[in-house]
Amino acid sequence: MDFKQLVSHCKEYGFIFQSSELYDGLAAVYDYGPNGVELKNNIKAYWWQSMTQLHDNIVGIDTAIFMHPKVWKASGHVDAFNDPLVDNKDSKKRYRADVLIEDYCAKIEGKIKKDVAKAAKKFGDSFDEEQFRATNGRIIDRQAKIDSVLGRMNDHLRDEDMVAMKALIEECEISCPVSGTKNWTDVRQFNLMFSTQLGNISGEEGKLYLRPETAQGIFVNFLNVQKTSRKKVPFGIAQIGKAFRNEIVARQFIFRMREFEQMEMQFFVRPGTEMEWYAKWKETRMQWHKSLGTPEEKLRFHDHDNLAHYANAAVDIEFDFPFGFKELEGIHSRTDFDLNQHQELSGRKVQYFDPELNENYVPYVVETSIGCDRMFLAVVSNALQEETLTNAEGQESTRIVMKLPHPIAPMKVAVLPLLKNDENLTNAAKDVVLQLKKHTQVTYDEKDAIGRRYRRQDAVGTPYCVTIDHQTLEDGTITLRDRDSLEQVRLSVDDARAKILSTTQMHSIL
Ligand code: GAP
C-alpha cells in the first residue's frame, strides 16, 4: 500500500484528520479521530508501562508546556535551536537548505538504484550487487559526488557556515521545485521555537516559548523528583507530552509536525558511566520496538553525523517508512550539559549527593526520545496491507487489513448480530457487549451484510469479531473470527472472552 493510500485510509477510517479542515486545514497540524486516539493512547500506554512499570528505577512526571524563559536560554535553544533557511526569490517559497541538498543527493541515489536494477535484470541470478557498485565507473562517480556533497554539508552545518551552504546549493545547481529558477536568497539561521506573550508583562520580559522538547521539564525538576521519590543514581524520569517546533519543511503527514507529542526518558548516571548506559539504552529501546512485532529489517541504528550542542554521543533508531529509512527515535548521551547550565543560570546548586562515593556531583544524562506521532505512523505503515484471499471455490478477492499488534488495536473485539432486524439477535449481541466491555475495548456493529462488517473491522485492525446467530439463542455459543487467520470457531462467551484477553492485554507484549 503506498503512502497516499495510507493517508486517505487514516482519514476514511477515523484515525487522523487535517486540523481545521473546514478552513482548508493548517499545515503540519493534525487531529486524531476516534480510532486514532485509541491507537495513540495504546502506544503511549505501551511506552509508559514498559518504562515505568518494568523499571523500578524510573518514575514518571507531567510538567507544564510553559516554562520560565531562562530555561530555554540555559538549554541553548534560544541561541542554537536553528535550521538553515533559504528562500527562492521568484516563487517566494521557503526551504530548509540542508533538505534541498539532501533531496539533490537522493535524486543521484535514485539514478544509482535505476542502474543497479537494470543490471540485475540483465545478469539475472548471477548478479552481485556489491561487486557491481564497487566496479561500475558511473556508479563510483555518482557515489563519490553524494559522499562529497553530504560530507561538506555536514561540515558547514557544524561550523554554522551559512555562506558555504549557499555556495554548495549554487555549486550543485539546485533549482526551486516550484519556479524552476536558481534565484536564491542568502542562507540564514531560523529559530524553531514558537513564542507567545504573557498577559501582564509587555515586551521581551513577558516573552514565553512553547516548549520544543519535554526534556527540560524533567531537568529542572531533577532535585524535586530525586528527593521526593528518594531515588538513588542511576535512576530515570519519564514523561509524555506535547512539544512545538516551527518546522520550515512540513511534509510527509504526521512525520514532521508543528505540534506533536514526545515520549522522553532522562536517565541520570554517575559521571564516567554514561557510555555503558548509552549502550544499554540503545539495546533496550531497539528491543522495545521488536517486542511490538516490528520486523528487524525495518529497523536500523544510524549514528549522528552532527552532534547536538548538548551531546557527546547520539544515535537514531530509524524505521523504514513508506518514504525510506528515517529517524523514529533518538538516544542521546547529553553529558552534564543541561543540569550544569541550569545550575549556572539559576544560581542554585543542582547536585546529587552519592552516599556510596560520599561526594556531590552533577549527574550525567542518557536520554531516550521518541515522537509518539512518528511511532503511530511507523505502526500504521507496518500494519496496513492489501491482501489477496482465495475462497474454497478458488475465487480471489482482496481485503485491506491493518495487522496491528493485538494489545494496541483501537478496539479488541467487535460484536456483530447476524441480522439487524431480529431483536432476539440484537438483544443477545448487546448482552455480549455488556459481558465484555468491562474487560476490554468493544465495539458493536449491526449495519450492512456480515461480510462488509468483517471488512470494516479488518480495516481498523480489530483482532476479533464475535458473531451472534440463532444458535447463540439456543446454546449461548458465539462464533469467534480471527482477523489474521480468518479462522472461525464456535465457543461459549466465557471461553471467547478468555481467548480475547489472552492475546490483547498489554502484558502479552511487555
Ligand atoms: N529531547 C531530545 C529531542 O527532542 P529530537 O531528536 O529533536 O530530540 C526526538 O526529537 C524525537 O521527537 C524524534 O526522534 C522524533 O520521533 C520526534 N520529533 C521531533 N521533531 C518532530 C516533529 N516536527 N514532528 C513529529 N515528531 C518529531
Image (tube, rainbow, N blue to C red):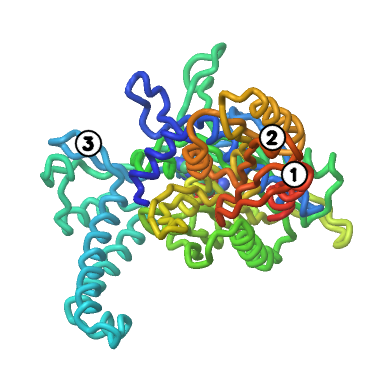
- Can residue 319 be seen at all in this image of the molecule? yes
- Can residue 263 be seen at all in this image of the molecule? no
Q: Tell me which numbered mark, 2 or 3, is placed earlier along the sequence.
A: 2
Query: What amino acid type should be assigned to the residue bearing mark 2?
Result: Asp
Query: What amino acid type should be assigned to the residue bearing mark 3?
Result: Lys
> Which SS class for mark 3?
loop
Q: Which residue is mark 1?
A: 497
Q: Which residue is mark 3?
A: 93
Q: Is residue 177 above or below residue 442?
A: below
Query: What amino acid type should be assigned to the residue bearing mark 1?
Result: Arg
Q: Tell me which numbered mark, 2 or 1, is placed earlier along the sequence.
A: 2
- Residue 10, given in percent of the width and then of the height, sits at 44, 38
Q: Tell me which numbered mark, 3 or 1, is placed earlier along the sequence.
A: 3
Q: Specify the label residue 62 is tagged with.
A: 2
- Along the horizontal axis of the image, is 112 left or right of 19? left
The span from disc 2 to disc 1 (Cα, nearest Å) is: 35 Å
Q: Is residue 397 above or below residue 139?
A: above
The span from disc 2 to disc 3 (Cα, nearest Å) is: 38 Å
User: Mark 2 or 1, which is nearer the eye?
Assistant: 1
> Which SS class for mark 2?
loop
